[in-house]
C-alpha cells in the first residue's frame, strides 16, 4: 500500500511523498513527481502519517488510525519548531536557527485574504509558492527565531490578518481579479509599514501568480484522472479526458492510501 505523507509544489513540480507500507505499517519513503497522464484514486481510510525529524520521516509509534496525524506525532514533528517557534524537543535545531535570518511576511490570496507569517529568509519565495500565495512581501527581518513569533502574533492581532488560510478558501479563489487583488494587498502592506510598529524596511511586493497554471472554472475532484497541468500550493490541477479543468485538494488526502 502507498500511504500519502505529504504533497508539495514549492519548486513548481507537483510531488507526492509516500511510504510503501507493509502489513506492519513500515516501509521505504519515496517521492513521486506528478506529470503527464495520471490515474490515482485515494482511499477513504486514513491513518497517522507519523512525524518528520531532521533525519527523515518516522512511522507513527501508536499505529493510530482514523486521523491524519495523532497528537503524539504532531508534537514530535519538525514543523512544530518552524510554525510556532517551539524548539524544546530539538535543541540542536534551535542552535542552528539562532544563526539564521528570519522574516515576517504578508501573503495575499485572491482579492481579500491576507496572511501574516514567519519563515527563514532563504525560504521566503519557496514558502510563498508552496502555500499558493498570489502576492508576497517581507515586512520585517529578525536575527534568529526568539523575537519574531511575538511580532507575528502582534501584527496578526493589530491588523486582523489570518494566521492560516484554509485550502477550501484557496480553492474558491483559483480565479480572481489580479488588478484588484494587487491593489488591496498593496494597501495592507502600506498600512503595516506606515504604522512604524516594525523595524524599518524597504518592502517589495512580489507577484507569485505568474508561477501557477491558469485553470478556468476548475471543478473540484476527489481523485486524479487526466493530464497534469501543475499545482498552486496544495491544489493539484489536471485536465480530464473531456478537456475540463479539475482541481484536487491534496491536503484532504494526506494520510490516505492510493
Image (cartoon, grey):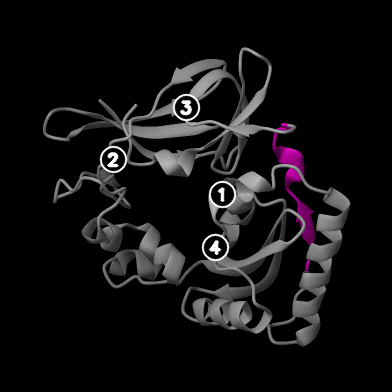
- For residue 46, which numbered disc appears in the image? 2
| Residue wearing tag 1 | 168
Helix, strand or loop at label 3? It is: loop
Q: Nearer the viewer, mark 1 or mark 4?
A: 1
Q: Is residue 31 magenta?
A: no
Q: CA distance from mark 3 to mark 2?
A: 15 Å
Callouts 2 and 4 close, C-beta under 8 Å: no
The image shows residue 98 at horizontal and vertical percentages of 45, 72
Helix, strand or loop at label 2? It is: loop
Quarter of the image where one finds residue 185: bottom right
| Residue wearing tag 3 | 223
Q: Which residues are the magenta region? A: 203-215
Helix, strand or loop at label 4? It is: loop
Residue 7 visible, this angle:
yes
Q: CA distance from mark 1 to mark 3?
A: 16 Å
- Badge 4 crowding class, 10 Å Cα cut-off, few under 14, some 14 to 19, many 20 or more, is few
Amino acid at each position: 500500500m502507498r500511504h500519502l505523507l505529504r504533497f508539495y509544489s514549492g519548486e513548481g513540480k507537483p510531488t507526492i511523498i509516500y511510504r510503501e507500507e507493509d502489513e506492519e505499517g513500515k516501509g521505504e519513503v519515496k517521492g513521486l513527481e506528478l506529470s503527464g497522464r495520471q490515474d490515482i484514486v485515494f482511499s477513504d481510510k486514513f491513518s497517522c502519517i507519523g512525524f518528520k525529524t531532521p533525519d527523515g520521516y518516522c512511522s507513527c509509534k501508536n499505529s493510530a488510525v482514523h486521523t491524519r496525524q495523532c497528537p503524539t506525532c504532531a508534537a514530535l514533528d519538525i514543523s512544530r519548531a518552524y510554525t510556532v517557534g517551539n524548539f524544546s524537543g530539538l535543541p540542536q535545531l534551535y542552535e542552528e536557527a539562532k544563526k539564521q535570518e528570519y522574516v515576517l511576511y504578508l501573503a495575499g490570496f485572491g482579492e481579500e485574504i491576507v496572511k501574516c507569517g514567519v519563515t527563514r529568509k532563504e525560504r521566503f519565495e519557496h514558502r510563498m509558492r508552496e502555500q499558493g500565495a498570489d502576492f508576497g512581501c517581507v515586512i520585517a527581518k529578525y536575527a534568529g527565531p526568539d523575537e519574531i513569533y511575538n511580532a507575528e502574533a502582534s501584527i496578526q492581532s493589530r491588523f486582523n490578518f489570518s494566521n492560516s488560510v484554509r485550502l477550501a478558501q484557496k480553492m474558491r479563489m483559483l480565479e480572481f481579479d489580479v488588478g484588484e487583488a494587487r491593489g488591496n494587498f498593496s494597501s495592507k502592506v502600506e498600512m503595516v509599514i506606515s504604522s512604524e510598529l516594525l523595524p524599518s524596511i524597504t518592502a517589495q511586493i512580489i507577484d507569485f501568480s505568474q508561477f501557477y497554471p491558469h485553470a478556468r472554472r476548475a471543478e473540484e475532484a476527489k481523485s486524479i484522472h487526466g493530464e497534469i497541468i501543475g499545482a498552486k500550493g496544495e491544489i493539484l490541477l489536471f485536465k480530464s479526458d473531456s478537456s475540463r479543468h479539475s482541481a484536487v485538494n491534496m491536503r484532504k488526502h494526506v494520510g490516505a492510501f492510493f
